[in-house]
Image: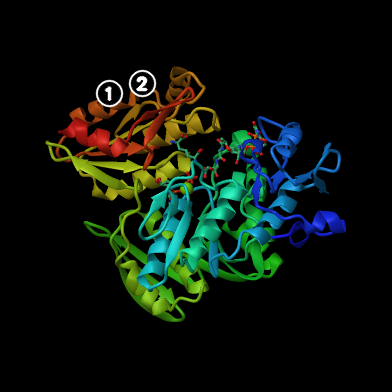
């Protein structure tokens, strides 16, 4: 592809150059690459422009003030956006149907359930998010929920070449504010909920909300659809934005107009939902427990219908949804007979949702074990301590990816609001203790790590899998 096909306003000589790829890290530049030089949280990409040119970059997308010598300077005050739009012209084809989901909690679950529903309808479907790039035959980790723009677009076009026609991705607030998912047509967007997280990065809830709203204001296509979970504190504000943008709106939930959740009755292995759609009622036996999983399943159904799926078939398929890895996953039943659940709750709201999901199934005590990630929002720590101790019978505070922080001080910040909790630093010892104390009527909840395969301590990732450790401790 020629540079002139990817960017406008270039001289004849510049336009004629052949582009071989895109990179945002100078160490990945090869001859013919377009390099994006961005100011980040840790580095200023502009410091690497000369190295990128030396490695063969033919063009550099950077702010007008940046110094570019020996390559074409594609200048823009918002270089991340310009870079994304140029890269999107290069990475083609992309799947014909693309959807995106945002929200504090429920993105991975909604993406995964949407992929499953599309697959049941006979489509070749994929998802990109916290679990990596998932198709019906493969899963590859990217390390981030929303990968960087080059990885994202490269994966989208790779999936399309493999025959994927339907793709859904998780749009994290970091990803949205850094333009990591721009340029390809997104026909359907969705919002699950908003609650405290990532205030270390965004500063205030309002700024966090605004970061998410870029999905509505700018990322979804002009003639696109938007599905909103109707029962969140922020739902009305989201609905207002969807209307202001002129997208076709679909609300789902107890207050939902497109799909109304009339009732929800827990059963032993799942729950029965009564839904109202287009004036008639339908019963769905969802094989997953917890209000939060019902919410995510309904948002997924909304996305599939908005993308053209037949409603009756979608409701039918909901009864065959498979559990999502690490989301209320039953790891083991202890020798005493207590089920041990692993869940990815890592925010105050997530903990409330996970505990509420298990509560109807507990006749004895609910034993909740969790920690909080290092180098992340510190304000959520006491809030997590408070909700866990208010809503559980026994609380164990342990470690969850301390990263560069002192694990003991993270635990102390949680314990400050959970005075009756037991503190056990090592996560394996903590899990062993929880399992030892559980009697036959109790349930153990191991929260925060879900599907994760490692404990991040300093800059090392030590192998760790809650499900596996629970099985070992229960053996
Ligand atoms: C705060 C944050 O979002 N950081 C991400 C972001 O970094 P950044 O843009 O600030 O970049 P930087 O490291 O300061 O470097 C600036 C530029 O110089 C370039 N560079 C840097 C060094 C070098 O030697 N050469 C070079 O060219 C970098 O590629 C970058 O373009 O872009 C980088 C490249 O894509 C990411 O690796 C990095 O993720 C860090 C590791 C991270 O921990 N991110 C987390 C917080 C995150 O993004 N989480 C979200 C939300 C999760 C959720 O859903 O809850 C996610 O989507 O995963
Ligand atoms: N709709 C929901 N409402 C409230 N809590 C939820 C909801 N969905 C999920 N959760 C809680 O959040 C946890 C993480 O769920 P999930 O992985 O689907 O969210 P996510 O938005 O992808 O998270 P991340 O920010 O890490 O990408 C779950 O294990 C559960 O505890
Ligand atoms: N995507 C989230 C996941 C948090 C999971 C938890 N285990 C932690 O490390 O805090 C984040 O990066 O904030
Ligand atoms: Mg996720």
Residue of label 2? 425
Q: Which mark is residue 429?
A: 1
The residue at 56%/49% (across/down) is: 151
Viewed as shown, does residue 264 lie left or right of 237?
left
Quadrant position of residue 465 = top left
Left or right: 25, with 63 as reference point: left
Q: Quadrant of residue 213?
A: bottom right
- Above or below 429: residue 4: below
Residue 57 placement, left or right of 226: right
Q: Coloured how?
A: rainbow
The structure residue drawn at horizontal position 20% and vertical position 28%, both measured from the top left corner, is 437
The spot of residue 376 in percent (x, y) is 54, 32
Residue at 14 percent of width and 40 percent of height: 337
- From the top left corner, tell me how far across and down residue 309 is, in percent: 45, 76
Q: How crowded is mark 2: few (under 14 residues within 10 Å), some or many (20 or more)?
A: some
Helix, strand or loop at mark 2? loop
Residue 460 is marked as none
Marks 2 and 1: CB-CB under 8 Å?
yes
The answer to whether residue 139 is above or below residue 197 is: below
């Amino acid at each position: 592809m020629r540079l002139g096909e990817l960017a406008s306003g270039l001289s004849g000589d510049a336009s004629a150059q052949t582009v071989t790829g895109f990179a945002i890290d100078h160490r990945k530049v090869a001859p013919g690459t377009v390099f994006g030089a961005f100011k980040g949280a840790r580095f200023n990409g502009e410091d690497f422009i000369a190295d990128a040119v030396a490695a063969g970059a033919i063009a550099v997308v950077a702010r007008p003030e940046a110094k570019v010598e020996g390559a074409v300077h594609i200048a823009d005050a918002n270089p991340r956006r310009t870079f994304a739009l140029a890269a999107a012209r290069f990475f083609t084809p992309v799947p014909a149907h693309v959807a995106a989901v945002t929200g504090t909690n429920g993105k991975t679950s909604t993406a995964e359930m949407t992929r499953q529903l599309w697959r049941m309808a006979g489509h070749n479907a994929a998802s990109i998010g916290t679990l990596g790039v998932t198709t019906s035959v493969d899963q590859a980790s990217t390390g981030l929920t929303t990968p960087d723009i080059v990885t994202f677009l490269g994966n989208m076009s790779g999936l399309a070449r493999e025959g994927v026609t339907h793709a859904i991705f998780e749009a994290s607030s970091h990803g949205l504010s850094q333009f990591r998912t721009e340029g390809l047509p997104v026909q359907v967007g969705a919002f699950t909920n908003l609650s405290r997280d990532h205030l270390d990065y965004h500063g205030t809830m309002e700024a966090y909300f605004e970061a998410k709203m870029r999905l509505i204001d700018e990322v979804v296509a002009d003639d696109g659809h938007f599905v909103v979970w109707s029962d969140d504190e922020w739902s009305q504000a989201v609905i207002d934005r969807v209307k202001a943008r002129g997208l076709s709106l679909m609300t789902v939930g107890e207050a939902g107009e497109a799909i109304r959740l009339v009732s929800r009755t827990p059963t032993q292995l799942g729950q029965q939902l009564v839904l109202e759609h287009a004036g008639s009622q339908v019963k769905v036996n969802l094989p997953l427990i917890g209000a939060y999983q019902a919410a995510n399943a309904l948002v997924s159904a909304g996305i599939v219908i908005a993308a053209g799926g037949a409603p009756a078939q979608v409701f039918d398929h909901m009864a065959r949804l498979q559990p999502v890895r690490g989301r209320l996953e039953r790891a083991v039943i202890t020798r005493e007979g207590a089920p041990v659940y692993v869940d990815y709750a890592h925010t105050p709201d997530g903990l409330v949702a996970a505990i509420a999901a298990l509560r109807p199934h507990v006749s004895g005590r609910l034993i909740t074990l969790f920690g909080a990630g290092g180098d992340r929002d510190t304000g959520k720590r006491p809030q997590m301590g408070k909700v866990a101790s208010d809503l559980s019978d026994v609380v164990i505070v342990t470690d969850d990816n301390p990263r560069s922080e002192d694990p003991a001080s993270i635990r102390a910040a949680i314990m400050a609001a959970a005075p009756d909790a037991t503190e056990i630093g090592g996560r394996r010892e903590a899990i062993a203790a929880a399992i030892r104390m559980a009697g036959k009527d109790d349930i153990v909840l191991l929260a925060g790590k879900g599907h994760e395969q490692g404990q991040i301590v300093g800059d090392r990732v030590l192998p760790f899998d809650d499900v596996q450790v629970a099985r070992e401790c229960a053996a």
